[in-house]
Image (cartoon, grey):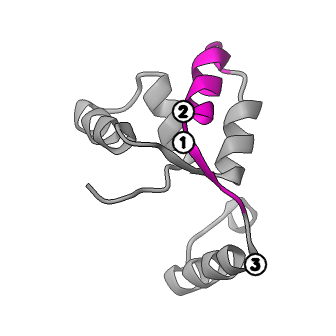
Amino acid sequence: MGQYLIDTNIVSKYLAGLLPLEGERLLDSVIDSIPQLSVITQIELLSWKSGFETRVTEFVNDSSIFTLTEEIVGMCVKLRRDRKCEHPMQQ
């Protein structure tokens, strides 16, 4: 299986048991190796008052965290512009 950078919403739904069975199976296979998160996802997850903070902390601790370099910021900007991704300020 390829490598995936996992989004905050997917992790929160996964840990809360809110993903459909097919999505849960896919994420199970993705995280069987080392889960990969951005530093932004790390911050969002560790700030989340979920009622199961221990599971969240363990998940983050078991993950590989990608920091934000100028190269990554530039790639994100290009992707968002090219794909016309919306963010909360546009809604």
Amino acid residing under circle 2: Ser
Are the residues flagged by discs 3 and 1 in contact, CB closer than 8 Å? no
Amino acid residing under circle 1: Asn
Q: Quick check: is 65 in the magenta stretch?
A: yes
Q: Residues within 10 Å of mark 1 (few under 14, many from 20)?
A: few
Residue that numbered label 1 is attached to: 9
**First in residue order: circle 3 vs circle 1:** 1
Residue that numbered label 2 is attached to: 12
- Report x, y in % for residue 82: 53, 86
Q: Quick check: is 4 in the magenta stretch?
A: no
- Report x, y in % for residue 84: 55, 79
Could you tell whether 28 is left or right of 14 in the image? left
Identity of the residue drawn at 50% across and 80% down: 83
Residue that numbered label 3 is attached to: 70
Could you tell whether 16 is left or right of 58 in the image? left
Secondary structure under the numbered disc 3 in the rendered image? helix
Are the residues flagged by discs 1 and 2 in contact, CB closer than 8 Å? yes
Closest to the camera, between mark 3 and mark 2, is 3
Q: CA distance from mark 3 to mark 2?
A: 27 Å
Closest to the camera, between mark 3 and mark 1, is 3
- Report x, y in % for residue 3: 38, 58
